[in-house]
Image (cartoon, coloured by chain):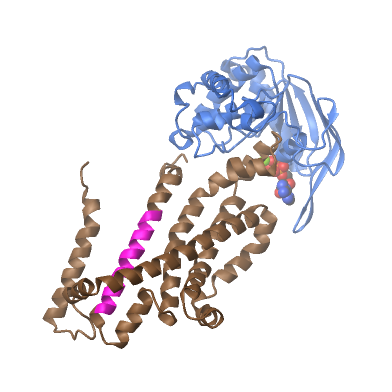
Chain colours: A blue, B brown
Amino acid sequence: MICLDDVSLSYKGRSGEVTALAHTSLTVKQGEFAAVVGPSGCGKSTLMKLVTGLIRPTAGAVFVEGKPVKGPVKIAGMAFQNANLLPWRSVLDNVLLPLEIVPPHRGRFRREKDFYRARALDLLGVVGLRDFAGRYPWEMSGGMQQRASLCRALIHEPALLMLDEPFAALDAFTREELWVVLRDLWQRLGFTVVLVTHDLREAAFLADTVHVMSARPGRIVETRVVDFLRPRPLEVCYEPAFTDLVHELRGKIAEVRQA
Amino acid sequence: MKIAAEDVTPVAFTVILFLAWEGACRLFHIDAFILPAPSAVFAAAAHYWWPLLKNSFVTLWTTVVGFILAVVFGITLGLVVGWSRAIYRGLYPVMIGFNSIPKVAVVPILIMWFGIGEIPAILTAFLISFFPIVVNVATGLATTEPELEDVLRALGASKLDIMRKVGIPRTAPYLFGALKVAITLAFVGAVVSETIGANAGVGHLMVQAGSNFQMPLVFAGLLALAVEGILMYALFALLERRMAGWAFRASMSAAG
Ligand SMILES: Nc1ncnc2c1ncn2[C@@H]1O[C@H](COP(=O)(O)OP(=O)(O)O)[C@@H](O)[C@H]1O
Ligand SMILES: [Mg+2]
């Protein structure tokens, strides 16, 4: 699904070049839930932009679905730490936004509005927001906004979901609630996920594989397969094997921060 | 509908102001050449109602024409400048620089170029109200959250799509805020131009009345200006609430 082959990326800033990624290689299989963890500023967001084709690598090649990435990939849904909902649109209309842009929905949107609305309401139902469809974003809590943001990222049934620290701004309880929401959405719809996070428990609970990045210039220094049985209940987080995994990941991060 | 204390306060305050003014004039025997009492001002307004109305109308239409020009050109230029962050960053200091030139200083030049009449008033109104519109529209566009842009670009949205779906709606509160300021500025521009050189308009009337020592009429002109100015501001404030009400409600809630 995703393949990064020896990718490097430098930004040209005011104070000279910043090498954000150096010789990074990464593969994510179809339908896999991959997590990327690493110290702040190591190039995680840069990695996301490379995969979605928003920026081009300085060296190396990026492939998505077997094809080299030359521009925005158009099959990706994205969500960020900030839900970034449009305040002048209701939750439902926010969720419908991608359909006004992505072909072939774009051409059909006006004619088949009812069909799409029903679809959006179903999706909102899955994350528990069906009754809030008519509300405006500012009338909702941060956790609810983030749920809506997930729906917006998934409404056009993308093959790939890119999440850049989506739960970082939420309190611990809401965050765990949203882990479960994301887990269920993923198991139901079967898309490929790349989740960037600095919460190691989040990565260990949700992902099939966890990739650890080094400090800047970033590259993948370790890949761990997480094989707890699915569907995973939240209780997994309190099993010794889980705690050990988080411990090891933590140790690895501490190590790369030192280096 | 219940009338709240907040709704009555402005009216009560205005009435008290006039009463205090009247009282002060009588109590201290203030010379009518210096400060005529409101009673005298209202009497002058009633007596000269026709010239006041006629000239108010002239001021109103020059203001509105100048303002409309400013809106059309301001929005167009604002869209161009806000189109890319690079253009915005390059031109913003220039715009701020232009905006800080006192536009009133160009009125004599405009009068020399276009002669005495409505054109200098229209152009002054235009010049003075143009920049706030450009600056606000451009700022509204250029400050679109980059992450939101990424979300849409990753879906294959064109620059035009992003403008239509996010940039332009997002600019609405900036635009209406600017229009409210701009209409008042346009009005100031038109009146200033009329006082310097015109043969109609409230500014012209006040200068004429002043040179004939008709102080109550001068103040009646001032009152006419105040009424016109407040009405125009109120109109745009109302429009703002209707067109971009979400911005008020969004900023009032913590979760916004
Ligand atoms: N547009 C940019 N121009 C210049 N430098 C940038 C830009 N974006 C990110 N960087 C730099 O690249 C490095 C990696 O950034 P980023 O990918 O955002 O890190 P992370 O998401 O892991 O915190 C940081 O040091 C950051 O300062
Ligand atoms: Mg980041």
Rendering coords of residue B124 (x, y %): 50, 72
Q: Is residue B227 magenta?
A: yes
Q: Relative to B95, is A159 above or below?
A: above
Question: In the rendered image, which quarter is residue B218 located in?
Answer: bottom left
| Relative depth, front residue between A203 and B121 | B121
- Magenta residues? B217-236
**Residue B54 in picture, x, y percent from top left:** 33, 70
Q: Is residue A40 above or below residue A179?
A: below
Check the picture and name the quadrant holding the C terminus of chain A. Answer: top right
Percent across and percent down for residue B57 are 36, 67
In the image, taking residue A38 as reference, residue A153 lies left or right, namely left
Q: Please say whether residue A52 is one of the residues in the magenta stretch.
A: no
Nearer to me, B163 or A12? B163
**Quarter the N terminus of chain A occupies:** top right
**Location of ligand 2 given as a quarter of the image:** top right
Rendered image quadrant of residue B28: bottom left
How many numbered marks, from 0 up? 0
Left or right: where does residue B151 sit relative to residue B219?
right
Does residue A31 appear in the picture of this structure? yes
Above or below — where is B33 with respect to B121? below
Q: Where's residue A135, x and y in %?
A: 45, 31
Residue A41: in sight, yes or no?
no
At a point 45% along the width and 72% down the height, the residue shown is B189
Residue under the image location 54 percent in, 83 percent down: B112
Pick the front one: A15 or A58: A58
Picture residue at 48% right of the left edge, 26% below the top: A133
As rendered, which of B57 and A59 lies closer to the eye?
Answer: B57
Q: Main secondary structure of the magenta part?
A: helix
